[in-house]
Image (tube, rainbow, N blue to C red):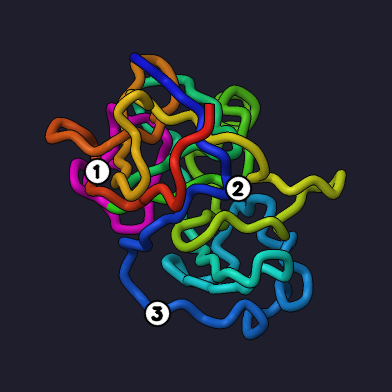
Amino acid sequence: MAQTNLDDANLVLIDRWPGIPNNILAIPNIAGTPSGLIGWSDTAVYPLGTKIIGIDPVTGAASTFIYLKYMKGADHDIDLAVKDVVGIWDTTPALYEVLNDGGEMLVGGPLAISINTLDYGVVFTTGGKTYQYGWFFCGGVVPTYIKNAAGTAVLDGNFTISDGSDAVAGTGLRAYDVAGAAAVLGVTVETDIAQPFGAFALAASA
């Protein structure tokens, strides 16, 4: 699989999830602290599918986030990394239950990008859990203000794009299944997992 790097500043997501986002300032426990979007919960703190929109103080651009239920899945032991693409689990699909294994994603479903990490072995195997609740980036310009405990912007830097040699400005992105690993973003082709949800704001950078 050919791959290229796409700078985060050149990626714009099209939000395919239902619902109208709330202003980020209207959400309890998040107002004034966007990094409150980082982390997991064993129980739902917000209604599943809650969407919020925030304005980046650096770029002035809008970004949308959605509250989802991240699932254990059935086929593979795959860790979740920041920038992983997630889609609806295809086993008895529930709209807001997602995972990052392309082989278990619902074909044609909406996508989101992880702003959290999760160690599959620690949380799902040793920890005995089957799901976790958390926020995901799902629309707009990649935010610079979502930061980890060290103060580093979690989505800063390059995204890996499969079949990158075919990527040009304005190209839609879908999810590609990668055997035994997390799904990745790639250019639009008929056999991809999910409908296009992203576009290049500018040309890809090597």
Residue at (80, 45) in percent of width and height: 152
The residue pinned by badge 1 equals 194
In the depicted structure, whether residue 201 falls above or below residue 62: above
Rendered image quadrant of residue 18: bottom left
Residue at image location 21% in from the left, 34% down from the top = 192
Secondary structure that dominates the magenta span:
loop
Which quarter of the figure is the N terminus placed in? Answer: top left
Please provide percent x and percent y for residue 84: 50, 36
Question: In the image, is 140 to the left or to the right of 40?
Answer: left
Q: Quadrant of residue 44?
A: bottom right
Q: Which residue is mark 3?
A: 20
Dot 1 amino acid type: Ala
Q: Secondary structure at mark 1?
A: loop
**Lower position in the chain sequence, tag 3 or tag 2:** 3
Residue stretch in magenta: 88-109
Labels 3 and 1: the sequence-earlier one? 3
Which residue was labeled with disc 2?
A: 115
Q: Nearer the viewer, residue 113 or 101?
A: 113
